[in-house]
Amino acid sequence: MTISDTRNQATDKGGRTVINHLSAHDITVSHYEIVQDDINAIQQSMTQLINSVDIIITTGGTGIAKRDVTIEAVKPLVDKELEGFGELFRYLSFTEDVGTKAMLSRAFCGTSGHTVIFCIPGSVGAVDLAMKKLITQEVFHMVNELHK
């Protein structure tokens, strides 16, 4: 799920990057959409997917601009927040990618029912980092834990 007021399927490089990483790890992508930077629109789309998919990955809307509302939309839907994801993402962003700009990221992860939700920045560099170093490394274990 790409959160953006300006992207479409032709220009959504971050969303395509997520799909490519998932496909490379034999993870089936059953749903892809672009949702406006709007709390109600994000929550409506999320609510339809929670418990019908194992993983939801959002790109975009995790910064500090006024229109960045992904985290505000997702947090109320989450049962358990996994703070370590955001902490590790910012650490890796700092050391391997953008330096001190990493502190502007509000990357987030939590669970809702049997679904793991990741909210990552929309830039291709951030998506690559999150997918390669964190999400694809642990997602199978996370999904297993939720289905125990």
Image (cartoon, grey):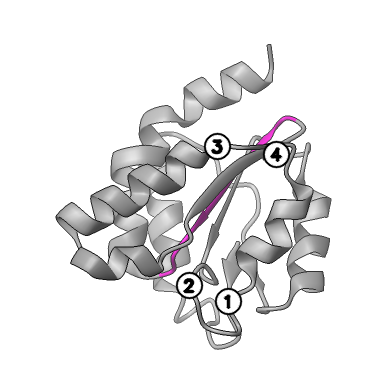
Which stretch is magenta? 114-122
Instruction: Name the element at disc 1.
Output: loop
Does 29 appear above or below 126?
above
**C-beta proximity under 8 Å, tags 2 and 1:** yes
The residue located at (35%, 64%) in the rendering is 103
Crowd band around label 2 with a 10 angstrom C-alpha radius: few (<14), some (14–19), many (20+): many
Q: Which residue is mark 1?
A: 68
Q: Which residue is mark 3?
A: 82
Q: Earlier in the sequence, mark 4 or mark 2?
A: 4
Residue 88 x %, y %: 35, 43
Of circles 4 and 1, the one toward us is 1
Q: Amino acid at mark 3?
A: Leu
Q: Amino acid at mark 1?
A: Asp
Decide if residue 57 is on the left or right side of residue 146. left
Instruction: Name the element at disc 3.
Output: loop
Instruction: Name the element at disc 2.
Output: loop
Q: Amino acid at mark 2?
A: Gly
Q: Earlier in the sequence, mark 4 or mark 3?
A: 4
Crowd band around label 1 with a 10 angstrom C-alpha radius: few (<14), some (14–19), many (20+): some
Q: CA distance from mark 1 to mark 3?
A: 20 Å
Of circles 4 and 3, the one toward us is 3
Q: Earlier in the sequence, mark 2 or mark 3?
A: 2
Q: CA distance from mark 4 to mark 1?
A: 24 Å
